Image (cartoon, coloured by chain):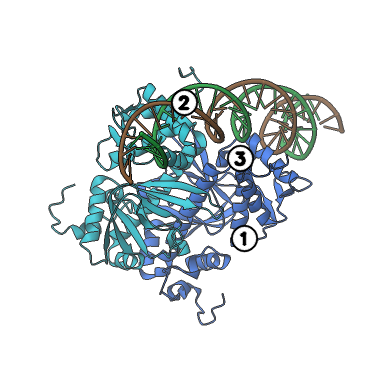
Chain colours: A blue, B cyan, C green, D brown
Amino acid sequence: MLDASAPDPCSRAADAPSLGLPCAAPCDGSREAISDMLQQLTCSDLPLRRRLLHAGDLVCRSGDAFGELHVIHSGLFKTVATTADGREQVVGLHFRGDWLGFDGIASGRYGCDAVALDIGEVWSFPYRALIAAAASRPGLLAVLHAAMSREMARERESMLSLCTLSVDARVADFLRRWVEALDLRGLRTDHITLCLSRAEIGNFLGMTLESVSRALSKLARARVIAFAQKGRRQVSIPSPQALGTYIERSLSPGPVTLQ
Amino acid sequence: MLDASAPDPCSRAADAPSLGLPCAAPCDGSREAISDMLQQLTCSDLPLRRRLLHAGDLVCRSGDAFGELHVIHSGLFKTVATTADGREQVVGLHFRGDWLGFDGIASGRYGCDAVALDIGEVWSFPYRALIAAAASRPGLLAVLHAAMSREMARERESMLSLCTLSVDARVADFLRRWVEALDLRGLRTDHITLCLSRAEIGNFLGMTLESVSRALSKLARARVIAFAQKGRRQVSIPSPQALGTYIERSLSPGPVTLQ
DNA sequence: CGGGCCGTTGACCACATTCAACGCGTGTGG
DNA sequence: CCACACGCGTTGAATGTGGTCAACGGCCCG
């Protein structure tokens, strides 16, 4: 973590031992890696646009001309895809350190809305400037690619959840992934503030809001989660791994889960 | 398409007008773009490993150390993710021009199996070599990023399908996307050779094999598709856009679809 | 010929959606 | 101040979509 020999944080990623795997510690998505990345982005000569956003504000809009990539500095964001026939779908949740806008690279237009779910800050960089800077700073490219790679892995996790789990397990898995995201960032994992409505969660998980509500109630009855006395969006998670065992139990048809 | 002024195909991407959008024609995924890309990759000094694969052969295995990215030169491939608790899930289908292995960049290990569904050829490149080459050849990076971007967009399409469509519509959408992939590559769109079993299709679409079978039968009854006289894996698609209207009709609760 | 794999179809059932009612907190206007 | 409406979450009962189980037919291969 500490790297006393490198007074200038900008040079860290470039200094990283460039052997073996192309992307080791500096882009594993951990808290330190994220801080490093953000550090690296500030003290560069990159044209940076900082924005403070409030719940409901858009980072970028589906269909708009692509030009910038956006990094989340703080806050929580959702990405929403819309089809020509009017279907709308929350396709991702994004935390500090995640990038938004990758889907615009190929087509030249952003593929979905990115919406703040809370107060948050994003930094936006012209894609062309990033690429240009990456030529002289290999660490930058590594960071970008790792972010894209992780995004793909997470989308696949969503697909797995959608395809193989029952509604109850899907909600549990949703919480598990959220906790995982918090853990990765060095945040508390015993408590989640759901800043989405039941309808949004249901949309994301491919189920109705009623099913989300019922699943959460069932999880609370099973003591896997607990609601704060006031506000049903404050969820405490006594044991993160209890979520995992709950999911596994719901897979096996074994001894019927009591109620 | 024709570019008489550039006798050396290797220089094309680098020559591409580097203004406006960073990635215009050369990475839109069209037949010409794919040919260009493959051309560009052959005549470079990149260490290239060509492989001919047969149905069932693995391009890369989940958990193996990441080192190479793979481009599909011909054939059809599926990617299969597996969880710790034993769930297995087809998470993507991949055609000529698609890349495999992006999910390994961040973690240093491939995230899923990539399996040939048919005879096919893949070219594998060391990731580090690609990155190194990209420094002197900006077109290469554009191609890579566009491929990643497209991959993400396609995964989101899958999620939309999974979350918002009924089983019948999901199967129709599956065929629609397949046809779209063929169309993009300049191939015939009036006929598909499903080289997956019903079970594999069902797994990919989050439903049982029986549901796939029923849905295909229903589509055939509705004259949206037709089976070849021999072999229920040969599907003819008289009108690709009929698939779209079928999907839309199944969305509106409107006039009940006659059986 | 027998066995295995694959695909189809039917009957039954369960899980999840739909529809509905209700409670709660909050903001607004009389 | 209370009344009221509104959004959000919860819960129950009815319905239906899709899963489960089973039987059957075609095909390939030993």
Identify which amino acid the numbered label 3 is placed on. Val
Residue A126 lies, with reference to residue B159, above or below; the image says below
Query: What is the CA distance from the residue labelled 2 to the residue labelled 3?
Result: 23 Å
User: Which label number is shown at residue A167?
Assistant: 3
Which residue is depicted at the point 34% across and 27% down? B225
Identify which amino acid the numbered label 1 is placed on. Asp
Q: Secondary structure at mark 2?
A: helix
Residue count near mark 2 (Cα–Cα under 10 Å), binned few <14, some 14–19, many ≥20 = some
Q: Pinpoint residue B172: horizontal percent, then vertical percent.
A: 40, 32
Q: Secondary structure at mark 1?
A: helix
Disc on the earlier residue, 3 or 1: 3
| Left or right: B198 in relation to B8 | right
Query: What is the CA distance from the residue labelled 3 to the residue labelled 1?
Result: 24 Å
Query: What is the CA distance from the residue labelled 1 to the residue labelled 2?
Result: 42 Å
Mark 3 vs mark 1: give the one in front.
3
Which residue is depicted at the point 60% across and 39% down? A202
Identify which amino acid the numbered label 2 is placed on. Ser
The residue lying toward the viewer, choosing from B92 and D2, is B92
- Name the residue that disc number 1 marks: A183
